[in-house]
Structure formats: structure tokens, C-alpha cells
Image: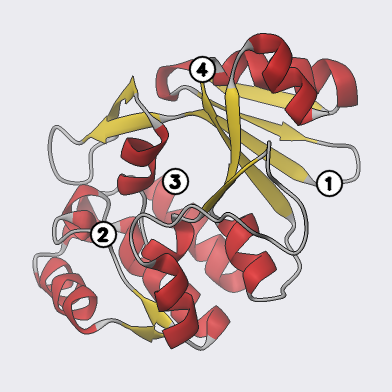
């Protein structure tokens, strides 16, 4: 259905992130992430009309989240770049191509994408711009660049959560940059609701 919607709207839709990662690891996913080269919010509205549920739109960030009656969540985002005016600030986003969108993500294992046009199980034609497949194979949590924890210090908590969930090791440089961010107390710059949400996710594990 999403493939048909994308063709109707002239968009390229990709499955990205956790769903792809979990399928490779043979784990169950409780949500689905779409990124859209084109109008992601239009895709979200079309999915809402088709499936119902509750649609929450974040126009400033070009994203939307559709929670179905079953509890399953579909997150939809326009492919975009992010710029952080200062450490731990909310990003300023601009529409971009898929590869630029993948480069802005938190960890290599969350950058994997599959086009809906070629999607079928088992997964083939996986788009991997950062070595995420190798890091899954080698059981490593790796950020994409050394400013990652400065841009978003909540990634410190996320790195720990993923390492525990998957029994992965935090890659050497990633651990060094994470410890540097901790020493600078960058998490203190993050808003209380964002910290709370990350701790709720940790407890939910």
C-alpha cells in the first residue's frame, strides 16, 4: 500500500533504521520507519486515511508518527539534513537526498535502508553507506562522526541501551568520544523531557 502511495505521489519511499536492523538480526520489530524522498508528510496523511489510527505531525522537523489501533507505530520522515546550532540543541532541518539523511543518523547499525520498490523478505539490495552491515556482523555500536555526542548527548544513553539490548560492544573511538562528552557533562544541556523519555526506554528493556 505504501509503495502504491509513493508511486501516486511521485515519491521514493525507503524502509530505514531499526526495522531493517532487526530483520537482519532476526528480531521482532514493534515499529516501522519510512523515509521519503519527496513529501513525507503527504505520505503520512495518505497512510492515515487508509489505516486510521492517530497521526501526529511535526512539521518543523518534516516528520510524522502514525499509531495504529493495534499499537503498531509507523514513523514517516522526509529525507533531510540536520544542523545543530549549539550542543544539545534541537536541529534545524532541510530536505535532502537519501544518502545525506542516512549520514545524519546516530549509529551505523541504524543507517541501513531498503527501497520499497525492491522490498521483500529475506532482505536484499540493502543500502549501506556507513558499514552498518559489517558492524552488525561484528557486534559493534559505532557513531558516524566524532561530534555525534556533542550534537545530541542523548545518544550516550542510546549507545548504552543498544549495547545491552543486543549484547554488542561500543566501538573504541565511539567509546572515547562518548566518555569525552560525559566528562563535559553534555547531558546536563538536554531538556528534562528528552532525558525522561530515554530513561523510560531503558526501563522498558
Find disc 3 in the rendering and name its residue.
193
> Would you say 39 lies left or right of 100 here?
right
Res. 158 in view: no
Residue 138 in the image: state x and y as whole percent. Answer: 42, 86
Q: Secondary structure at mark 4?
A: loop
Q: CA distance from mark 4 to mark 2?
A: 25 Å
Residue 178 in the image: state x and y as whole percent. Answer: 21, 72
Q: CA distance from mark 3 to mark 2?
A: 25 Å
Q: CA distance from mark 3 to mark 4?
A: 31 Å
Quadrant of the image containing the N terminus: top right
The residue under the point 88% across, 26% down is 51
Q: Observer-nearest residue: 5 or 146?
A: 5
Find disc 4 in the rendering and name its residue.
38
The residue under the point 31% across, 37% down is 100
The residue under the point 55% across, 56% down is 126
Q: From the viewer's perspective, is residue 10 above or below residue 114? A: above
> Which of the marked residues, 3 or 2, is nearer the chain's N terminus?
2
Residue 60 in the image: state x and y as whole percent. Answer: 41, 18
Callouts 3 and 1 close, C-beta under 8 Å:
no
Res. 55 in view: yes
Q: From the viewer's perspective, is residue 98 above or below residue 108? A: above
Callouts 3 and 2 close, C-beta under 8 Å:
no
Find disc 1 in the rendering and name its residue.
71
Find disc 2 in the rendering and name its residue.
144
Amino acid at each position: 500500500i505504501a509503495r502504491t502511495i509513493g508511486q501516486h505521489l511521485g515519491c521514493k519511499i525507503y524502509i530505514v533504521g531499526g526495522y531493517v536492523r532487526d530483520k537482519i538480526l532476526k528480531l521482532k520489530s514493534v515499529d516501522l520507519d519510512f523515509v521519503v524522498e519527496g513529501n513525507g508528510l503527504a505520505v503520512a496523511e495518505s497512510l492515515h486515511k487508509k489505516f486510521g489510527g492517530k497521526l501526529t505531525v511535526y512539521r518543523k522537523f518534516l516528520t510524522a508518527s502514525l499509531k495504529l489501533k493495534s499499537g503498531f507505530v509507523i514513523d514517516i520522515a522526509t529525507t533531510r539534513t540536520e544542523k545543530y546550532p549549539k550542543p544539545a540543541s534541537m536541529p534545524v532541518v532541510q530536505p535532502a537526498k537519501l544518502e545525506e539523511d542516512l549520514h545524519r543518523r546516530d549509529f551505523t547499525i541504524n543507517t541501513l535502508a531498503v527501497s520499497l520498490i525492491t522490498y521483500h523478505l529475506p532482505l536484499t539490495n540493502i543500502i549501506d553507506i556507513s558499514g552498518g552491515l559489517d558492524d552488525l556482523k561484528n557486534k559493534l555500536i559505532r557513531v558516524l562522526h566524532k561530534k555525534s555526542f556533542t550534537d545530541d548527548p542523548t545518544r550516550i544513553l542510546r549507545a548504552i541501551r543498544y549495547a545491552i539490548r543486543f549484547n554488542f560492544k561500543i566501538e573504541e573511538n565511539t567509546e572515547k568520544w562518548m566518555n569525552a562528552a560525559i566528562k563535559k557533562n553534555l547531558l546536563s544541556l538536554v531538556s528534562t523531557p528528552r532525558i525522561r523519555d530515554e530513561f523510560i526506554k531503558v526501563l522498558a528493556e
